[in-house]
Amino acid sequence: MRASGVLLSIFCGPCVCIYVGFAACFCPGRLRRRSEPEDKRRFERRQRKAPRPLVVRKRALSIPLPEEPETEEPGVPSSPEELKQTTIFQEKSRLMALPLELREMIYKAVLGNDVMHVIHKENKLGHLRCKANSEKACPKRWHGVGPCADSCWGVVDSSNIWMPVEEPQGSDGDVLPLLQTCRQVYSEAFPLLYSTNTFSFIDLDCLRYLSATILPSRFNAIKSLRIEWYLTWPLYDVFAQRMLFNTALYPPHDEATWEDIWRIIAGMTGLQRLRVDLKYFDGFRDNECEQKMLAPLRQVKGLKEFDVYLGWKGKDVTGAPFKLTRPVNTVPDDSSEEEDW
């Protein structure tokens, strides 16, 4: 038995060496791919499936229409692209016969006063309406690090990209039909879509993509925002990053993305209400790391409601523009303990 094993190793050893040498010279990707971390592969796939940036349309969708371009001969367009768009006013429509206030009430009933969960699809963003009757009753049931089928978010793959289940879930289709009715309905109803809904995120990249794929005026019209995020260790923990190997954090779990998100939120001129739910596996190692994590949130000021809910114990935070809530009573400050002692 031992002799056969020795003979097998003598015969297979040179073959393995030849294969490794050949792969290292002509196919280095085969050897390198296996050593790459899973987080990096997920990040690269998310980059390939990222939504496309905002494209400037040649034809405006909202009214008023642009003025007719100047041409060499009056009344003659220089190219088909410069043909002036025409708008057929709907005076005979019963909907347009109603006062604007009543039409806006209809638009809000169809498009607004709801929670829109923004999801990352392949090469685009989508949304799912919240199943709950209220924002607090949202059935967020998580399995591991991602949402499961019975939550409002549906199912995502290993890269946190939304995927339909066996029974296709309706997404995005309940908004477009009304907006595509005519240009006047689009112009009157579209602003209400952003100003009357709460936009909910569980993926920081989705918020970044939304700011880059819609007009700035639409993005700044958002008044209510909700973010739920699972922080990844060792975020802002310099000691752990130095002592451990392979601790590189890939977007959107790194410090740069976290700080960029709060720079974007701080620039939202129309934002009035913001709720942030943060979870961490066992809380931060020390208070200094937590303060570094909360520092970007201090850029957001002037909101009517700014609530931050942390899923771990810790000390009180003073002088912040947000209201901090923890699951249990906070740990008393060291100075107060010395005074009591």
Image (cartoon, rainbow, N blue to C red):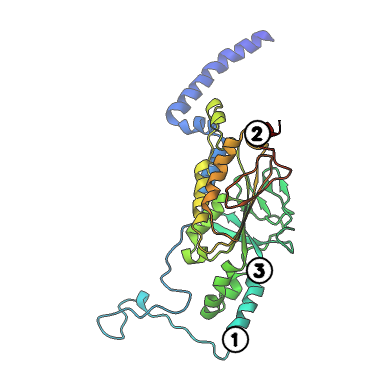
Q: Which mark is residue 60?
A: none
Q: Earlier in the sequence, mark 3 or mark 2?
A: 3
The residue drawn where x is 37% and y is 74% is: 81
- Tell whether label 1 touches label 2 (CB within 8 Å): no
Q: Which residue is mark 3?
A: 113
Q: Secondary structure at mark 1?
A: loop
Q: Is residue 86 left or right of residue 226?
A: left
Mark with earlier residue (1, 3): 1
Image coords of residue 166 (percent x, y):
71, 55
313 versus 228 height, above or below? above
At mark 3, the secondary structure is loop
Which residue does the numbered mark 1 point to in the structure image?
Answer: 99
Q: Around disc 3, counting alpha carbons within 10 Å, would you say few (fewer than 14), some (14 to 19), or many (20 or more)?
A: some
Work out how far the residue at label 1 is from the one at label 3, CA to CA, in angstroms: 20 Å
Q: CA distance from mark 2 to mark 1?
A: 63 Å
Quadrant of the image for the N terminus? top right
Residue denoted by label 2:
334
Of callouts 2 and 1, which one flags the residue occurring earlier in the amino acid sequence? 1
